[in-house]
Amino acid sequence: MLPAPRPGTRQNPPAGPPGIARIPPIWPNLPAGHLRVASGTLLPVIGLIVLLTATLAAPAAATVPAPAPAPPAAVQLAASGMERGRPPEAAIHWRRSLALGKPNRGRLAGGVELPAAGTHFVAVDPVTGTSPNRAWRRNGTDRLLEVLLGVAAEHAAAHPGAPRLVVGDLSRPRGGRFGPEYGGDGHRSHQNGLDADDLHVRIRAGPRTHR
């Protein structure tokens, strides 16, 4: 048992483990009014823990993915403009058609409208002499339009650089009479969607109508 210290003498604190310097307490240096902890060595430890926590949390916050930016307006316009490069024939509303009766006394059911112009043809109004022909004069059966487009493509392939095939009147949307009351000389036929006027291009004499 160690002897008790004499009154009025200062007792030195016990030494720490061998080879480890003792850290002096810092709580005596705290300003007045601050809470003193049991050991002044806890404050540096707490500060180190807070520093490590902040350092480890920083990369986690940086890895949060940012929202993807919206595509540029030019890209959107380019995507929407891809449809504009289609040939006019691609806009044809194909459906099953019926030619009822005879060409000079008949009707057209399920008529298909020929475009005002195409890759190898152009429609001309024989009454006004202007292009394009009016839409209500450009209707026929689906089979008639298939033949017209095929002939126009074959003509262009056989005569590179030649003008496009010129197409005149077909039938009215529902067929029926197509006489002089509809302009010009009218047609005795063109009533059931099986007739079409076209202009053949002659090398020296210019266009000539053939029915």
Image (cartoon, rainbow, N blue to C red):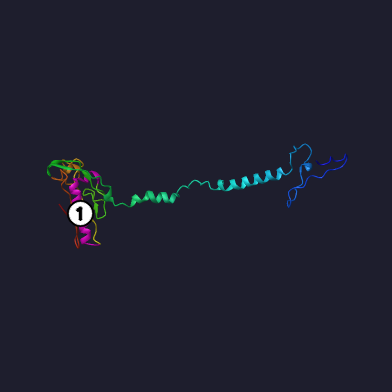
* Location of residue 158 with respect to 186 vertically, above or below: below
Q: Read off the residue under disc 1.
A: 150
Q: Position of residue 64 (x, y in %)?
A: 53, 46
Above or below for 88 versus 173? below
Quarter of image, res 102 = top left
Q: Give the residue at x 70% y 45%.
A: 44
Q: Is residue 82 above or below residue 161?
A: above
Query: Where residue 82 sits: x, y (%)?
Result: 35, 51
The local secondary structure at tag 1 comes to helix
The residue at 65%/45% (across/down) is 49
**Does the segment drawn in magenta span residue 153?**
yes
Dominant secondary structure, magenta: helix
Q: How many marks?
A: 1
Percent of width and height locating residue 67: 49, 45
Left or right position of 107 against 41: left
Q: Quadrant of residue 34?
A: top right
Residue 103 lies in magenta, yes or no?
A: no
Stretch of the chain drawn in magenta: 134-160
Q: Few, some or many C-alpha atoms within 10 Å of disc 1 (few <14, some 14-19, many ≥20)? A: few
Left of 16 or right of it: where is 86?
left
**Looking at the figure, which quarter contains the N terminus?**
top right
